[in-house]
Image (tube, rainbow, N blue to C red):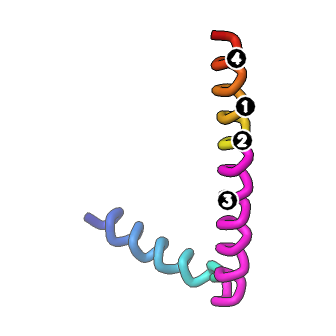
Amino acid sequence: MKKLVQFFKDSAAELKKVVWPTRDEVISNTKVVLVSVVIIAAALGLVDFLFVSAIDLIF
């Protein structure tokens, strides 16, 4: 039981050391992720379309 209490005390101490991002940083990083996802999805969709078109031409 003593180790469990010590674990939670240590965890709380470590969480106080964490430098949390600001709201603006979170919003900015979220925009970057969303734009990246859209670009990669479009690229994969284009590649898929090209493969399907090539297979249709072959068969």
Q: Nearer the viewer, mark 4 or mark 1?
A: 4
- Which is more N-terminal, label 4 or label 2? 2
Report how far apart the C-alphas of labels 2 and 3 lie in the structure: 12 Å
- The residue closer to the viewer here, 5 or 49, is 49
Q: What is the secondary structure assignment of the residue under circle 1?
A: helix
- The amino acid pointed to by label 4 is Leu
Residue 33, image x, y percentages: 68, 65
Q: Is residue 39 magenta?
A: yes
Q: Are marks 2 and 1 in contact (CB under 8 Å)?
A: yes
- The amino acid pointed to by label 3 is Val
Q: Is residue 17 above or below residue 40?
A: below
Report how far apart the C-alphas of labels 2 and 1 lie in the structure: 6 Å
Q: Nearer the viewer, mark 2 or mark 3?
A: 2
- Which is more N-terminal, label 1 or label 3? 3
- Which is more N-terminal, label 1 or label 4? 1
Report how far apart the C-alphas of labels 4 and 3 lie in the structure: 28 Å
Give the residue number, with chain letter if any, for mark 4.
Answer: 57
Q: Is residue 56 left or right of residue 2?
A: right
Q: Residue at x 64, y 89 (%)?
A: 23
Residue 12, image x, y percentages: 47, 79
Q: Residue at x 68, y 27 (%)?
A: 53
Give the residue number, with chain letter if any, for mark 3.
Answer: 38
Residue 50, image x, y percentages: 72, 31
Q: Nearer the viewer, mark 4 or mark 3?
A: 4
Q: Are marks 2 and 3 in contact (CB under 8 Å)?
A: no
Q: What is the secondary structure assignment of the residue under circle 4?
A: helix
Q: Nearer the viewer, mark 3 or mark 1?
A: 1
Q: Residue at x 65, y 66 (%)?
A: 34
Question: Which residues are drawn in magenta?
Answer: 21-43
Give the residue number, with chain letter if any, for mark 2.
Answer: 46
